[in-house]
Image (cartoon, rainbow, N blue to C red):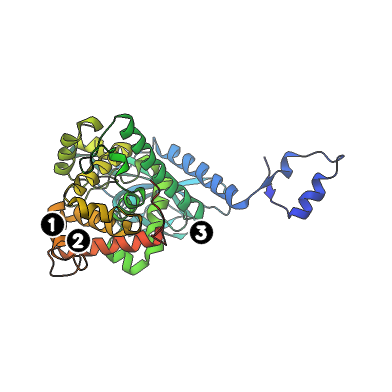
Amino acid sequence: MMTRPCATLAALFFFVSLPTTPLRAQDVCVDPAEDAHARLLERIAEAKDRLKDEPIGTTRLGGQYAVLALWDPAADDGIDLVRVRGGISRTAGFEVTLIRRNGVNSEYRILEPAGWVVLAIKTNVHHPWNRRRTLPVIYVPYSTGLHSPQLVRDGRAYLLDLLDSAADRLDELRVLSASQEDTAVSAVPSVRVLLTILLIEHITPSELERQGVAAVVERVLVTLALNRGDTYGYAMSYAGARGLAQFIPGTYRSIRRRYPRARLRRDFTSGMMDHGNAVMAQYCLVDWILRMLPDETLEELMRADREEDLGAFIAAAYNAGEVAAYRALARDPERWTEEGYGLPRETRRYVRTFRTVYRHLFPGSERNPDR
C-alpha cells in the first residue's frame, strides 16, 4: 500500500469534513519515521532469510571472514550478499573493509557503493559447548547507518520487559530474599540499578571517555533492539564471563545452588544465552550481595534518594566480589570508592561508569524507583 506523510491538522480536518470524499488507502496518515523503521525491520528479516543457506566458505572465526547482507536504504531495490575475507570484500562491485573486529558485532565501512549499510552478517563463532568447533551464526552488528531514536527506545523497552518478566517469574516461583526477611527476591533490587548494570557490562571505560555516555548507551540499546534474545549470546570475556549478564561459571553455580526455588538452568552456557534465565540469576545475585550489609546500612541505602549509592555498592560487588566491596565501604562510607580503600583500579572505574550511565538514564535520582 502506498502511504504518504501526515498532513497538517488543518488540512486533515478539512479532508475528513467532506462527506462526499471517500477515504482511500493511499491517503492513510503515516509517520515517516515509523514507516522507515518498519521498512528497516522488514529488510533485516529478509537479509537474515537470505543468509540462512549461504555458506561462509571457511571455518575461520570472527568478522574478518563473513558474508554480509548489504542494502541501499535510499534506493531500496534489493539486498546484495558480499563476501569478506581477511577483513576485505571479495565481491565485485563492492569495496568493504573491517574497521572494528568484534566477533559477530564487528563494524564495517562500505566505501563503494556509497550510502549502503550492513543489515546482517553470517560468520563463525566458537561452538558454545565445544570450543574446538565453530558454529555459523547470523547477527545484526551495530552501525551508525542503522541507528535511530526508535531503535534506542525499542532496546530500552526490551530490557525493561525482560526485567519485569524475570521478576514475575521469580514471584510465581515464590523465591524469597536472602538479604531481607519475608521479602520476595524480586522486590529487593531496583529495576533501574539492574538495568544500568546490564548496560555497563557491555561498555568499557575507554569507550565511555572517548565517545561519551549517550553514544555508548545508545549503541548497546540499538544492538538489543536489533537482535533481542540473541544479543550478546556469543559474548565471552577473558575471564569466562558470558552473555547479557556476564556471569562467570562459578558465580552462576553458586547462585543456582543458593536459590533452588528459582529453577535456574543447570547448564551455565545455555543459562547465560537465555536472557530470561540470566536476568533471574541477576536478581538473585544482587540480593545475595546485599546480605553482606548490616541491617542499618542496608536500610539507609535502600532509601529512594540513595538508590545511586546502593547501585554503586552493587556494581563494586558485581565486579570485585561482595567481600572486597563491603570492606572498602566499611573503611569509609564517604570515600570508599577512592584509591587506597581497597578496591582494584578496574572496579573503581567500573563504579564510575555505573554512576555516569545511571545519571544519564535517570536524571534526578530522588525519584522513586520503578519497582
Give the secondary structure at mark 2. helix
Circle 3: residue type: Gly
Give the secondary structure at mark 1. helix
Circle 1: residue type: Ala
What residue did someone put label 2 on? 347
The reply to whether callout 2 and callout 1 are in contact (CB within 8 Å) is yes
Report the mark closest to the observer, 2 or 3: 2
The reply to whether callout 1 and callout 3 are in contact (CB within 8 Å) is no
**Depth order, front residue of 79/118:** 118
Report the mark closest to the observer, 2 or 1: 1
Residue 202 showing in the rendered view = yes
Q: Earlier in the sequence, mark 1 or mark 3?
A: 3
Q: Position of 361 compared to 333: left or right? A: right
Asked where in the image residue 316 lies, by quadrant, the reply is bottom left
Asked where in the image residue 179 lies, by quadrant, the reply is top left
Give the secondary structure at mark 3. loop
**Depth order, front residue of 27/105:** 27
